[in-house]
Image (spheres, grey):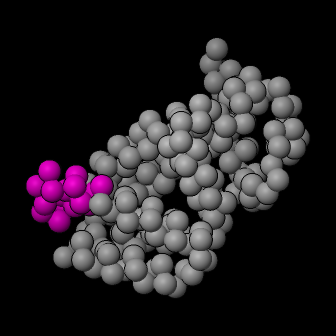
Amino acid sequence: MPEQGAARERLLTAVVDHLAERGLGDLSLRRLAEAVGTSHRMLIYHFGSMEGLLVEVVRLVEARQRALLASLPLDDPAEAARAFWRTLTDPSLRAHERLFFELYAQAAQGRPGATPLLDGIVTDWLEPVAAIQRSLGHPPDVAEARARLGLAVARGLLLDLIATGDLPAVNAAMDQFIALTTT
C-alpha cells in the first residue's frame, strides 16, 4: 500500500509540473496521461476522474503555497506579505490560478467531482495568514477575521488578474491593502 501512495504522489507531482509548464489548454485525460508517462487508466485508478485529479492538483499547489507563506520571516510582516503576493502572481502560476477558480466555481455549484475542493479551501489558510496578524499584536479573534479578509482580497485580486491581465494595477491594489493591514 505505501508504494501505491508513492506512485500516486509521483503522478500528481508530474501532472502539477506539466500543467505549470504547459497550462490547461484543451486538456484531456488521455493526453495528460501520455504527457506524464502513464495511462489514463492509472490516473483514473489513483484519482477517480479528471475532476478528482484536478482537485488534487489544486490542493497540492495550495499546500505548497501555504508552506511558503509559513516559511517567510515575520520580522517585517508587510515585506513578507509583499513577497508572498509576488510569488502568487508569478506568470508561471497563472494556469494554476485559472484552474483554481474554474474548479472553485464548479464546486460551489455542487458539481460532484469538484465538491471535495471546498473542504478546507478557506479554513486551511486561516492559521498561516492569522499568524502574520498576530505578529502585529492583534488578538486571536481579530487576527482570524483579518486573515479571512486577506484571503478574500487576495483571491479577488487574483481573479482580477486572470480577467484583466493588469499585473501593475493588481499589484498596486495589493500594496494598498498590505499597507492598510500591516500598520
* x then y, percent, for residue 171: 46, 80
Q: Is residue 10 left or right of residue 60?
A: right
Q: How many marks?
A: 0
Question: Can you say whether 171 is above or below 133 in the image?
Answer: below
Q: Is residue 5 left or right of residue 156?
A: right
Look at the image and give the residue range highlighted in magenta. 132-148
Quadrant containing the N terminus in the rendered view: top right
Q: Residue at x 14, y 50 (%)?
A: 141
Look at the image and tell me whether residue 59 can be seen: no
Look at the image and tell me whether residue 51 can be seen: yes
Q: Is residue 74 left or right of residue 152?
A: left
Question: Can you say whether 182 is above or below 62 in the image?
Answer: below
Q: Nearer the viewer, residue 2 or 173?
A: 173
Q: Residue at x 62, y 19 (%)?
A: 2
Q: Nearer the viewer, residue 8 or 149?
A: 149
Residue placed farthest to the front in the image? 109
Q: Residue at x 45, y 61 (%)?
A: 155
Q: Main secondary structure of the magenta part?
A: helix
- Find residue 84 and report its image quarter: bottom left
- Find residue 24 and report its image quarter: bottom right
* x then y, percent, for residue 148: 30, 55
Q: Residue at x 24, y 71 (%)?
A: 181
- Find residue 29 and report its image quarter: top right
Quadrant containing the C terminus in the rendered view: bottom left
Magenta run includes residue 177: no
Q: Nearer the viewer, residue 175 or 101?
A: 101
* x then y, percent, for residue 10: 70, 36
* x then y, percent, for residue 168: 52, 85
Question: Can you say whether 159 is above or below 109 in the image?
Answer: below
Question: Can you say whether 128 is above or below 179 in the image?
Answer: above
